[in-house]
Image (tube, coloured by chain):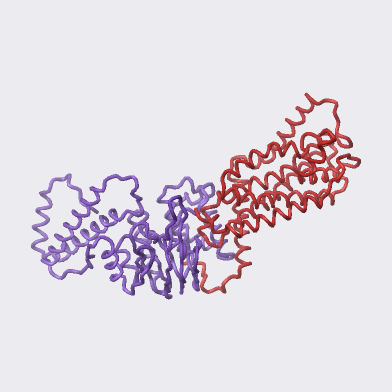
Chain colours: A purple, B red
Amino acid sequence: MIEIRNLYKRYHNHHGSPWVLEDVSLTIPDGVSVGLLGRNGAGKTTLLRLIGGMDTPDRGEIVRESRVSWPIGLAGGFQGSMTGRQNVKFVARIHGADDEIDAIIDEVEAFADIGDAFDEPVKTYSSGMRSRLAFGLSLAFDFDVYLSDEATAVGDRAFKKKARQAFEARIGKASLIMVSHGESVLREFCQAGIVLEKGSARWYDDIDAAIAAYHQATDGRVPRVPVVPRTHAEAREGLNEANRDFAEAKAAFEAAGDDPDREAEDDTLRWRLEEAREAMLDARRHVQRLRTPAQKTSHRNSSNRKPPHKKRRP
Amino acid sequence: MAQLSLSRRPSRGPWRVTRSVWFAMFMREAISRTMADRMGWFWMLFEPLAIIAVMVSVRGLFLSGSEVAGADHVPWLVVGLMGYGLFRENMMRALGAIEANKGLFAYRQVKPVDTVLVRCFLEGALKSFLFLLFIGIGTLLQFDLMPARPLGVMLDWLSLWALGWGAGLTVSVLGDLVPEVGRVVRILNLPLLLLSGVILPVMYIPYPYREYLLYNPIVHGLESMRLSFFDGYHTLDGIDMTYLWFWALSLIALGLILHLRFAAKLKAE
């Protein structure tokens, strides 16, 4: 259980220091995975850092009665001049591993799957390799509560799948507190939600309710709860809708342009685009699945006639 | 999956956690200090050697004929440089400790003060080893580098270490909160070297100014160490280790208080 009591936090800067979090009191029970929602700068990451003990509140306190991880996939805690193996050893030592140290190293090595680079200095790693290592490191310890800040978004497709499986294997034994703009990710992993708005936090027992409340507070868009279609016609309709959504999201994303202020991790529009794309792909898969055999052959013929330069997504 | 089963073990007390952190930090610092750099070991040895060689030749050129009363010149210089180096390196390494380990504060077990303490400990251990090595090599080369009163030398060495430790604890906080402090400390290095009687014997200072020299605690440490090292060495009156320890303990206390007070601020990016 994690108890947050009358939490206040602000960062001092030159033009006034407004509260990022103001009098937040929450209790996160054991075994419940929670998604943190809120617009950019609402304090999601701040709250996560406070829960993880990386930052101290200005007022109030956080009582951790369970073992809380550092944010999963955090790559900042590596020393560049030391090898992956040495870095893993360091973290294992901090957490009091004495005899298990070799087992932990073996496991991280296997999970990160970066081959001989494991014995090269971390500064020679690509960002993908870094996050693989960081992710493997987080999963080598069985915390009660894992913190995640857009973690499942790292790596290539195969690694993402692996990470997701590792997460799913952990559900039931451990819970998750995650910050993500990806609504499907939140729906998949979380049961409850916290919506941060203007310094205060509201708890929702149901993640769908939290997502709905978040949209109501921000852009007024009504979130679409995914339904599995049963007939081909339904599936086609769903696909049309998803295509429309995608076009809309893409237009919004492109209209925003290349503003340098747009933080890559924290870009709502980019996330909306990704979401729409995922939804579109899902819908397409449903259409394929529900097609009658006759339609399948006709489609294959039609797809043969397609010009070859048209790329299809894998 | 072979995991570290945290949930099955009893939760560790604060002292156990701190010990784990110190051990992990020490191994990490030791490796990055000695192995990470190309020829790290070589430079650690060669750097003081080169400084000593330069100083000896400078004195041979410009100040020939002037002798230090009661001690050979090279051993006298070696003791001074090593002692001052111990203090300075402790202070300077600590100055960068927090900045260099910012990433580690993501693991909430690691506190800013740990990085400083571990660095100072490692630095002192390395310097002690080097000093022993120099004494050994110097003796083999027939310099008179055998201390006359080894226990006294050890005590003085530890006192200078403590002084460096205190200075390191204090400036590590101040330097992180106010970056200019770090710059000022770096600038102060040279005058401090000259005012501590490392290169220029304190007895060369004109009589009226000697009492001001005695305000510098490093002078007390170095001259006391030389007194223990060389039988019949002459130095200033009023060398007093209590004065040095007054500084050392005050600085350590001040540094720890600052670390306690500003722990949250030092952790924040």
Q: Is residue A211 left or right of residue B189?
A: left
Q: In this view, does A3 lie to the left or right of A219?
A: right
In the rendered image, the vertical position of residue A211 relative to residue A153, given as above or below: below
Who is closer to the viewer here, A298 or A65? A65
* Residue B235 image position (x, y, % from top left): 86, 40
Who is closer to the viewer here, B175 or A205? B175
Who is closer to the viewer here, A179 or B216? B216
Quadrant assignment, res A147:
bottom left
Q: Is residue A280 visible?
A: yes
Q: Can residue A111 be seen in this view?
A: no
Q: In this view, does B157 lie to the left or right of A159?
A: right
Q: At 13% across and 63% down in the image, what residue appears?
A: A236
In the rendered image, the vertical position of residue B61 relative to residue B268, given as above or below: above
Q: Residue furthest right?
A: B232
Q: At 81% across and 35% down in the image, what residue appears?
A: B201
Q: At 13% across and 67% down in the image, what residue appears?
A: A234
In the rendered image, the vertical position of residue A122 relative to residue A106, given as above or below: above
Q: Is residue B68 left or right of residue B100?
A: right
* Residue A111 image position (x, y, % from top left): 43, 59
Q: Residue furthest top?
A: B61
* Residue A169 image position (x, y, % from top left): 39, 69
